[in-house]
Amino acid sequence: MFVDSHCHLNFEELAGRLPQVLEAMREHNVTHALCACVDLQTLPAVLRLAEQHDNLYASVGVHPETDESQQPCVDELVELARHPKVVAIGETGLDYYRLGERTVQDMEWQRERFRTHIRAAHICGKPLIVHTRAAAEDTLRIMEEERAGDTGGVMHCFTEPWPVAQRALAQNFYVSLSGIVTFRNAADIQNVARLVPLDKLLIETDSPYLAPVPHRGRPNEPAWVSDVGRFIAQLRGITDAELGAATTQNFFRLFNLPLPS
């Protein structure tokens, strides 16, 4: 079986056909999924999904690209994380990809928001879901400074080369790979897929984005995490069942959940 460790079922591309999305998960042997929160305005919708379905979980956080005026405080995040279906803080992190006329120096609000999330994770004892794009050095530096490894977490939708993965692994973080790993030009990510210790590997869709081969060009969905898993299994020279069992166990271990029978 497989687990989608990061998706956005509340986004309109999926929310409008949720029964079909959940049925496709069952058909593809994808048993559970984590619906990651990107802002506090849509958190109620994320929580409703988790409340209504035993096999769905939620996180609480504000995505680094969300408007800089929306700044949650530590206490607010900690209180929201008390919900019984919230298993993580995030997604949080840094994203310098679309700076426009701004500079890296102008992104201090992102860096401070990231620190806020890490501090909340320390208090509530839940792992972090970290997003980093075009900002790996600052992301890892802040994680080190704020002792993010004390709570641990996952580098979601990982797209960096192996040395960055090594530094994250050294901080007690898992590495999660999305459908990007199946893309023809993803040599660095495929190398990471081969090298990450199996007990530190997760798989995800980040749906409705980043549909894997052979579904490219269509809205992604959790069922297709099975394609990600099968592709990585081939890269590593192991069976689909071995890859699925390992990444499923890693998911439940990281998020401190009982492993289903």
Image (cartoon, rainbow, N blue to C red):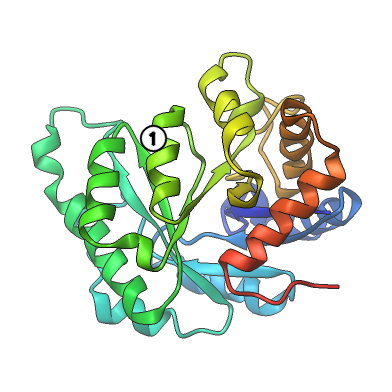
Query: Mark 1: which amino acid?
Result: Val
Report the residue at 51% width, 84% height from top: 83
Report the residue at 50% width, 74% height from top: 44
x, y (%) of residue 197?
60, 43
**Does residue 66 sit above or below 31 in this rendering?**
above
The answer to whether residue 103 is visible is yes
- The quarter of the picture where the C terminus appears is bottom right
The crowding category of the residue bearing disc 1, from other C-alpha atoms within 10 Å (few below 14, some 14 to 19, many at least 20), is: some
Judge left or right: residue 57 versus residue 168.
right
Q: Nearer the viewer, residue 175 or 36?
A: 175
Report the residue at 56% width, 17% height from top: 187
The answer to whether residue 160 is visible is no
x, y (%) of residue 121?
36, 72
x, y (%) of residue 5?
62, 55
- The quarter of the picture where the N terminus appears is bottom right
Q: Nearer the viewer, residue 175 or 46?
A: 175
Report the residue at 60% width, 25% height from top: 190
x, y (%) of residue 235?
72, 26
Judge left or right: residue 121 versus residue 172.
left
Q: Residue furthest top?
A: 185
Q: Nearer the viewer, residue 78 or 44?
A: 78
